[in-house]
Amino acid sequence: DWGYEILRPGETESCAIKKNGDKYDRASLRKEIVKMKVDRPKLSIAAVAADDKLDFIEVVGVMDIVVDSGLVNVSLGQVPGFRGQPKPCGGG
């Protein structure tokens, strides 16, 4: 309900990209995924987990962003139990 959540490889805490009103912030998601790819250029795997309430078109949009960013081995899963809202991505 609140936006995207990113868990980077090797980290135990995720970060959040909040929605802008009722819209997901795809530009900020793309920025974070590209930064992750730049930081780890050999990284090619990503897992996209989606809440059951999420529209399929939004899931496909996220997968497109991930693949366009160079993470070409993408799997789809389901969000684990709620762990609380993570800190904001990008430190802000």
Image (cartoon, grey):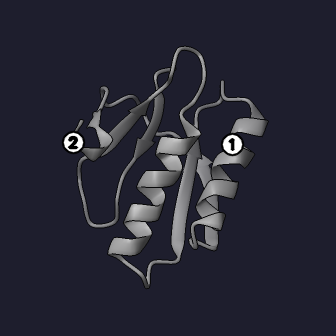
Say which of 49 and 17 sits in front. Answer: 17
Is residue 86 shown above or below 91?
Answer: above
In percent of the image, x 57 and y 52: which residue is there? 48
Q: Which residue is mark 1?
A: 59
2 vs 13, left or right, is right
Q: Residues within 10 Å of mark 1 (few under 14, many from 20)?
A: some
Q: Which residue is drawn at the image coordinates 45% and 78% (left, top)?
A: 43
Using the rendered view, name the quadrant where residue 76 is placed: bottom right
Spot occupied by residue 13 in the image (x, y as percentages of width and height): 24, 47
The total of numbered circles placed on residues is 2
Identity of the amino acid at label 2?
Answer: Gly
Farthest right residue in view = 57
Q: CA distance from mark 2 to mark 1?
A: 25 Å
**Residue at point 42% right, 81% down?**
41
Q: Give the camera-side residue of 53 and 71.
A: 71
Q: In this image, 9 relative to 13: left or right?
A: right
CB within 8 Å, label 2 to label 1: no
Viewer-side label of 2, 1: 2
**Residue 78 seen by the camera:** no
- Say which quadrant the C terminus sits in: top left
Q: Is 31 placed above or below 15 here? A: below
Residue 89: x and y, percent?
31, 42
The residue identified by callout 2 is 91
Which image quarter: residue 68? bottom right
x 51%, y 39%: residue: 79
Q: Position of residue 51 (x, y in %)?
A: 59, 32
Q: Sequence order check: which comes first, mark 2 or mark 1?
A: 1
On the question of residue 16 being in view, the answer is: yes
Judged from the image, the secondary structure of the residue bearing numbered disc 1 is: helix
Provide the secondary structure element on which disc 2 rests.
helix
Q: Amino acid at mark 1?
A: Val
